Image (spheres, grey):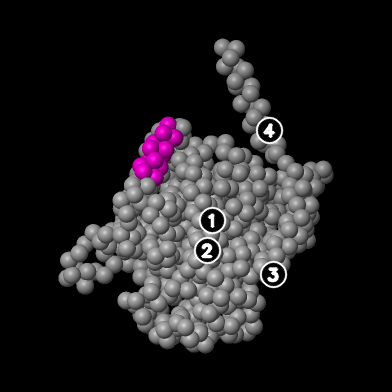
Amino acid sequence: MQLNIIDISIIVIYLIANIILGFWISKRASKDINSYFLGGNSLPWWILGVSNASGMFDIAGTMLMVYWLAVYGMKSMWLPWLWPVFNQIFLMVYLASWLRRSNVMTGAEWIKTRFGTGRGATLSHIVVVIFALIGVIGFLSYGFKGIGKFAVAFLPPLVTNPETLMKYPQINTNLYALILMAITTIYVVKGGMFSVVITEVLQYGILTISSIAIGIIAIIHVSPEALNSVLPAGWKSLFFGWNLNLDWSTVHSVASSKVTAFNQWIASDGYSLFGLFFGMVLFKGIFISAAGPAPNYDMQRILSTKNPKEAAKMSSLVNVVLNPPRYFMIAGLTILALTSFNSLYKSSLTQPDFETILPEVLAHYIPVGLLGFLMAGLIAAFMSNFAATVNAAPAYIVNDIYKRYINPNASAKKYVKMSYLCSVLVVVVGISVGFFIESINQVVLWIVSALYGGYTAANVLKWYWWRFNGFGYFWGMVSGIITCLVLLLLDYLHLIPFLHTWPLPYNVSMNSFPVIFIISIIGCFVATLITPPESDEVLMHFYKTVKPWGFWGPVREKVMKANPGFVPNKDFKKDMFNVVIGMVWQITLMAAPVFLVIREYTAFFVAAGIMVVTSVILKFNWWDKLESAYGEDKHQIKIKISESELQITEETK
């Protein structure tokens, strides 16, 4: 289907408006690199929260979750734990505040706070920069593949030569992704964090309206009887046993060849043994979440907040503003697709590309005018995620490499110009990788299961164990990343068949995570124990500043001996209780909108009731205690006093 001129006009106007807004804001963003990458730590927490949610509301992820809900039903609510989605709960409860106390610009710069400036810290700093850039390139290729698949479903092909299409079947998909990425890059590079945040707030408004519209259209078009006729038993249940027990061959109203494809996808994903899969995801997810945010746009939003208390509030808001509208849209798209599956996939019976469900449904159901608005909203989702990722990456190159090692005395404008150049360079590399990716799911599973296996062990230990040092961090990260890359190469050469069969059949990424994690943690402990601990000065400063709980006994004793009035963090039990309550709360935010769209009203009211109860618990046991736990830091008060004194001096002159 090709868009009407009205729809195309709406999309073009929207894209031009974003570019103009980016240039309009650019003067404020280009004062220095703190303004460029962190917005000068002046943006309110609720604006950063909406911006962060908008960046996570990406089109590639939405397409993937539509596929998950269509094939796995309500059990798909657990699949985002692969990322893991509940890391936002760990962040809001305590980790965002711990991170913000460091008062740095990037995750790599944070290493100095924890390990000082010795050789081990320098090596750790370098490996974090490398990991951050690898992760960013992965996410850019992920977004590249998603927006290309979405655009090509609506827009006329740019290449029509049969021979070229035969040789390069994805050429139109990649070309449209290239064009949209180029447009987004223009305003991101020019406007920095201010441009990203302001445009993302605008984009979030469009996305929310789009989500509500799609959900309402689905409710109007699909009756409960029509939906039930195309669903297998157990599709509407959140709960599961050892096996998935979801058999699409029992649905007789859908063409058998297509049903076979559904069952084949479940088998190839490796989720048939759902109980075992869930246990592995939970195990992996807890460790990754406890490690804190990876060095990406999520971390940049936390570091951009005004203080630790606002960092915690910002992370909590992400759950509230992201999940309900997003899942309202996902549910609407899914039931529209399932009830008209035959007509949507006439030309691809045996192996339909389920990642294109979203554009196919929009093309069939949304009227002229509204389709253009919804397209603008979904392109906004892509642009938000892409913009946030592009803004995060150059900070590591400019602040952590160029400024620290190459030109530490350059002017503020020089650093900003270098940021422009690095942004473009990162985009070019990400697009180049995207040309070789076959599916969105392929990129997601590699990033969240394989690559993050190398990140997790070292970044858990850095928070909770005083003896862990810079050498342990470096070798833990290096051993994990190298293992990840070696496994990818061996799998590509078909030399490690056991990863395809054990313990989860066909799930290479999940099966590789424990291997990578174990090798990484061995690297952490061996390197730490054969090298001396960090100095008392470094450890005591970190402990006093961040105030973590965990295995910090020797350092805690030294701090309290030097400062008898120091009050250590005794909130471990409270924080863990709030994490468990928060995970339940988050699942209800995801499930309730879906139950509403499919009109399972009993389940909806149960989910809504649990949401209210958990919200009340978090209000009294977490939100109300933020003021005392994470009030305004003394060093921030000193900064404000110094600024006031400077202003008085200038006025006197």
Residue matched to label 1: 212
Disc with the residue nearer the chain's start (2 vs 1): 1
Looking at the image, do the residues carrying marks 2 and 1 touch, with CB atoms under 8 Å apart? no
- From this viewpoint, which residue is outermost toward the top? 653
In this rendering, which labeled residue sits more in front, label 3 or label 2? 2
Residue matched to label 4: 637
Rendered location of residue 242, percent (x, y): 63, 84
Does residue 302 belong to the magenta stretch? no
* Residue at the spot 63% in from the left edge and 23% down from the top edge: 644
Look at the numbered disc 3 and give the secondary structure of its residue. Answer: helix
- Within 10 Å of disc 4 (Cα), the crowding (few <14, some 14-19, many 20+) is few
User: What's the distance in space between the residues labelled 2 and 1, CA to CA?
Assistant: 12 Å
Give amino acid for label 2: Ile
Per the rendered image, the range of residues in magenta is: 13-27
Would you place residue 26 above or below residue 143 in this image?
A: above
Looking at the image, do the residues carrying marks 1 and 4 touch, with CB atoms under 8 Å apart? no
What secondary structure characterizes most of the magenta part? helix
Residue matched to label 2: 220
Would you place residue 345 above or below residue 641 in this image?
A: below
User: What's the distance in space between the residues labelled 2 and 4, CA to CA?
Assistant: 55 Å
Residue 602 image label: 3
* Residue at the spot 58% in from the left edge and 63% down from the top edge: 85
Residue 164 image label: none
Look at the numbered disc 1 and give the secondary structure of its residue. Answer: helix
In this rendering, which labeled residue sits more in front, label 2 or label 1? 2
Looking at the image, do the residues carrying marks 3 and 2 touch, with CB atoms under 8 Å apart? no
